[in-house]
Image (cartoon, rainbow, N blue to C red):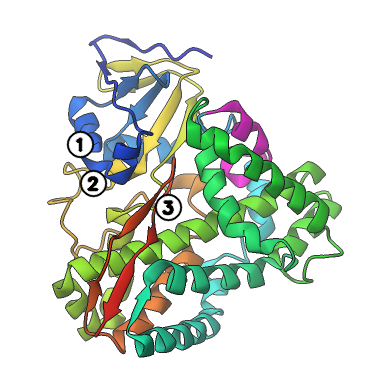
Amino acid sequence: MTNTVLSRTAPATCDIDLFSDQHLENPYPNYKLLRDAGPVVHLPELNVTALARYKAIRFALDNWRTFSSADGVSLNDLLNKAWTGTVIASDPPYHSALRAVLNERVSPRQIRKLTADIEARAELLVEELVERGSFDAMTDCAYRFVPPVILDLIGFPKEGSENLLQWAEQIFNVNGPDGNQKMQESVPGLVKMFEWLGKECTKDRVTPGGFAATIHEAAERGEIKPESVVPLMAGYSIPGTDTTIGLIGSALHLFANNPDQWKMVRENPDELLRPAVAEVLRMESPVQWFSRVLKQDYDADGVIVPEGSRILLLFGSGNRDERHFPDPDRFDVMRDPMDHLAFGGGIHGCPGQHLAQLQAISILKAFARRVERFEITGPAVRTLNNTTRAFFNLPVTVS
């Protein structure tokens, strides 16, 4: 597959390492360099062309016929093949059939029916944490809150599901380029995950009425291919776990560092919790990038990127693009950036986004009733992942 950039004007070329630990710790200076370099930037080490500006990324998300997902959204053939038969790595018409399996189950109307249960879970957990006074926002809060909700909805067997968090991180590491150390070290976890889903999450072992059972039933009716069952179960469960955990951690970190914004939310939670979560998603996109493959030449303001090129859509960069978001590095709960890129867009918009937002809003709502201020009391340690942005540890005290 070629990825040579042909242009009427010389394309920008950049040797930034998007997968170094330094970049993963703080990608935003590099993202600005890429945005300022031009409408598209060729990364020769990866042999990909990056879109770092909001307008270009939004255009790509809205034009699946040109920016195709059918060849996978990863930077290596291993994961692209593993994701074959999932909503994330397919185009219509099969994408439409896959999406239809759980479309109603993850619709805003159906997710709203979970509100009372999820809010009750959040209340119990937050009450315990506030009574303690000091806790780790990741291990004591996000890790304890998110997985049980998703596991109950999916209906996986309990034995083995304790590995979901580890597998989620490994999947997103495997998303990186061939030869990358994190990618290579995570491959065994990917293999184990697919083995567990295939052997242990059979129709007779998953919970009747759960998402997994619905996927099995769709295959039995011939609506999807049998080989799509395992990757579809993976796609609707494991990635959503890791990213929602990252969202909650980022929210608590941002509010700890911006107490004035938390004060505004506490004073008006009914109006500001939803836009506040959207602003967290814009500031710290849980998924920083996915890729596409061009099915026809793409003209980016005079720079022609040829058919067959793999394109890197840098969501984390687009969400900080000063061309679209004024003062983009400022956390502002009044901004209401509902057009952020954190959930992708177009036909490939994240199917679990309504559940993720409900979980984040519920936990913040429970804190808003009890907590005037968050204070970070120790080193905030990030999980340096090839694709996602999250904390590993975030010690806080509440008052």
Residue at (15% x, 57% y) in the render: 330
As drawn, 390 above or below 17: below
Q: Earlier in the sequence, mark 2 or mark 1?
A: 1
Out of 281 and 110, give the one closest to the viewer: 281
Identified by mark 2, the residue type is Arg
**Pointers 1 and 3 in contact (C-beta within 8 Å):** no
Q: Give the percent coordinates (x, y) of residue 375.
A: 23, 74
Q: Distance between the residues labelled 2 and 1?
A: 8 Å
Check disc 3 and report the residue beneath it: 343
Q: Which of marks 1 and 3 is nearer the N terminus?
A: 1
Quarter of the rendering containing residue 246? bottom left
* Identity of the residue furthest to the front in this view: 378
Check disc 1 and report the residue beneath it: 32
Residue at (42% x, 52% y) in the render: 343
Identified by mark 1, the residue type is Lys
Q: Distance between the residues labelled 1 and 3?
A: 21 Å
Residue at (83% x, 58% y) in the render: 202
**Pointers 3 and 2 in contact (C-beta within 8 Å):** no
Q: Give the percent coordinates (x, y) of residue 105.
A: 63, 66
Within 10 Å of disc 2 (Cα), the crowding (few <14, some 14-19, many 20+) is many
Which marked residue is nearer to the observer: mark 1 or mark 3? Answer: 1
Q: How far apart are marks 3 and 2 (CA)?
A: 15 Å
Residue 320 has which mark? 2
Q: In this view, does 242 lie to the left or right of 161?
A: left
As drawn, 126 above or below 17: below
- Looking at the rendering, in which quadrant would you find the N terminus? top right
**Pointers 2 and 1 in contact (C-beta within 8 Å):** yes
Within 10 Å of disc 3 (Cα), the crowding (few <14, some 14-19, many 20+) is many
